[in-house]
Image (tube, rainbow, N blue to C red):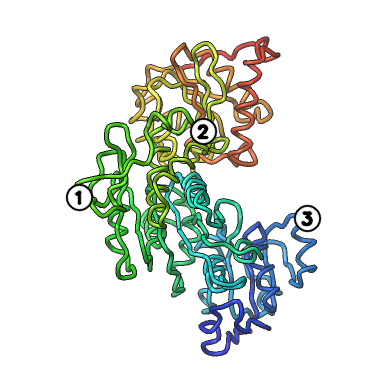
């Protein structure tokens, strides 16, 4: 059966919640939080929805017929019969479906239009009245923190703000919230940007930033160039401010090559002295030289590094995120004094360079959110002498440059996870002078207990024991949050002087 497709031009006409979506045959791929939000939205619009997923939670599976959709769960190496018979006029893919997935290839071969959730959300953003402004944030690292910061700074001025997207709240849920919002601060993954780049959707954000770019998710995109191209999509059609990282030349190139709305400005940020269109640091003061009339000879003070230090916000990569968020907030018209007050009340989420405790002059830091080498690089750079707890799923990324760069600051290393040999070899090449302990990957119930015991044996007063895995967590944990929580629990057992103190210490092994 060959697809009949939509009537000519019908999808082009579906650019409003109030358009006629009734009867549109749509297949939704995936049933996580994003997939369910897509299915729920489309059924509310009156579309004929079939959800196709490899797995489904019991809760979502029960809700699908309630909202008026149908569900097929099973092996998706070939299009299910139900999908072929549904003859979709449109497919909306969840971010987990990579370009090489058999159903994505099938959709392309059958010339079925393919959207992601972001395009659908943009088209129906007018459900509850005047659409919110969109501020887009992407990057290899720092996205979630910068989204939270930006939303906090804008909300401090009295605006109704929804942080949403890859941060955990689907954009479609924010669009359909009956209270309505002035601003969406949208975290976009490279996967979501990939699908947005496939379409001609006229997403015209107020402002956008790509915080940084490093090799990541290569198994999904197929190449670094494809990953970089997806990230660069964030700047397309920006109307007011394209914020970029002066310390990462690739982000400036993205802005230079972007097709933006006339009048959009390029705004740089980094930890150095700012130029006339930048945000940066002068004598320990975060300054704005972009959003003032006399920006060639003066600057506006945002906050001091000393003030940030009292909030635990002074790590270099966190300061960079604060500058990026401040640039986005200033572009939206938020006054520096409002930003300053808001930052005094801001705290990082758990598992993001979080101080657990200081014991005997040793600081124990949980940065489980450092799930790739780029994030771990930023975390390691904040400290002088480190016992490093690392490892997990490397996702095809090379850790060798990371180890080489930070070898001189390592007191020791504790390797967890299932991909240990590559890490151990890199440590042997670049840091042969340090002790290395490998936690047996089969000891899944005691990974962090063993890791903390080993790190405690290596660390000395003045050191930081840093969980910055440089790898994903799903080989041994349900997510980076569980990994960080178990690390913190094991550390706190030391603090409490409990059973942890009585365990036989692991034998130190040089690898």
Q: Which mark is residue 58?
A: 3
Looking at the picture, tell me which residue is in the foreground, 497 or 451. Answer: 497
Residue 357 occupies which quadrant of the picture?
Answer: top right
Q: Residue furthest left?
A: 297
Q: Which residue is the site of mark 2?
A: 367
Residue at 80% over, 68% down: 66
State the SS at label 2: loop
Classify 111 as above or below 395. Answer: below
| Front: mark 1 or 3 | 1
State the SS at label 3: helix
Q: Which residue is the site of mark 1?
A: 296
Give the x, y percent position of residue 400: 37, 35
Residue 483 occupies which quadrant of the picture?
Answer: top right
Give the x, y percent position of residue 457: 53, 13
Of the two numbered discs 3 and 2 on the same chain, state the one appearing first in sequence.
Answer: 3
Locate the C terminus and report the quarter of the image it occupies: top left
């Amino acid at each position: 059966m060959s697809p009949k497709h939509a009537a000519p031009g019908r999808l082009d006409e579906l650019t409003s919640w109030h358009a006629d979506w009734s009867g549109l045959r749509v297949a939704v791929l995936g049933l996580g939080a994003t997939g369910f939000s897509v299915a729920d939205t489309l059924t509310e619009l009156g579309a004929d929805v079939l959800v196709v997923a490899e797995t489904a939670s019991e809760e979502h599976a029960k809700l699908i017929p309630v909202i008026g959709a149908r569900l097929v769960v099973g092996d998706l190496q070939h299009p299910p019969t139900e999908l072929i018979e549904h003859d979709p006029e449109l497919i909306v893919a969840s971010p987990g479906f990579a370009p090489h997935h058999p159903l994505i290839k099938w959709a392309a071969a059958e010339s079925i239009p393919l959207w992601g959730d972001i395009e659908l959300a943009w088209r129906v953003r007018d459900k509850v009245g005047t659409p919110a402004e969109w501020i887009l944030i992407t990057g290899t690292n720092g996205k979630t923190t910068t989204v939270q910061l930006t939303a906090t700074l804008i909300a401090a001025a009295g605006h109704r703000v929804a942080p949403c997207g890859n941060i955990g709240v689907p954009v479609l849920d924010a669009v359909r919230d009956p209270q309505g919002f002035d601003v969406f601060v949208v975290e976009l993954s490279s996967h979501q940007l990939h699908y947005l780049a496939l379409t001609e959707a006229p997403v015209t954000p107020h402002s956008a930033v790509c915080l940084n770019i490093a090799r990541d998710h290569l198994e999904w995109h197929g190449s670094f160039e494809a990953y970089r191209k997806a990230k660069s999509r964030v700047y397309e059609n920006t109307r007011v401010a394209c914020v970029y990282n002066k310390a990462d030349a690739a982000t400036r190139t993205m802005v230079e090559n972007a097709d933006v709305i006339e009048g959009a400005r390029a705004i740089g940020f980094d930890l150095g002295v700012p130029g006339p269109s930048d945000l940066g640091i002068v004598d320990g003061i975060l300054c704005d030289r972009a959003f003032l009339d006399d920006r060639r000879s003066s600057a506006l003070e945002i906050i001091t590094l000393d003030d940030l230090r009292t909030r635990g916000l002074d790590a270099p990569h966190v300061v960079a995120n604060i500058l990026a968020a401040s640039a986005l907030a200033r572009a939206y018209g938020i006054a520096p004094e409002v930003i300053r007050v808001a930052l005094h009340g801001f705290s990082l989420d758990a598992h993001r360079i979080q101080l657990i405790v200081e014991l005997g002059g040793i600081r124990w830091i949980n940065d489980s959110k450092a799930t790739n080498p780029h994030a771990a690089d930023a975390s390691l750079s904040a400290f002088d002498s480190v016992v490093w707890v690392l490892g997990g799923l490397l996702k095809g990324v090379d850790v060798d440059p990371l180890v080489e760069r930070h070898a001189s600051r390592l007191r020791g290393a504790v390797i967890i996870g299932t991909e240990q040999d590559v890490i151990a070899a890199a440590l042997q090449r670049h840091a042969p002078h340090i002790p290395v302990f490998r936690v047996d990957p089969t000891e899944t119930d005691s990974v962090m207990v063993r890791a903390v015991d080993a790190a405690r044996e290596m660390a000395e007063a003045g050191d930081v024991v840093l969980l910055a895995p440089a790898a994903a967590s799903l080989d041994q944990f349900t997510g980076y949050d569980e990994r960080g929580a178990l690390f913190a629990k094991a550390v706190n057992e030391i603090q409490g002087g409990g059973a942890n103190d009585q365990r036989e210490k692991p034998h130190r092994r040089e690898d």
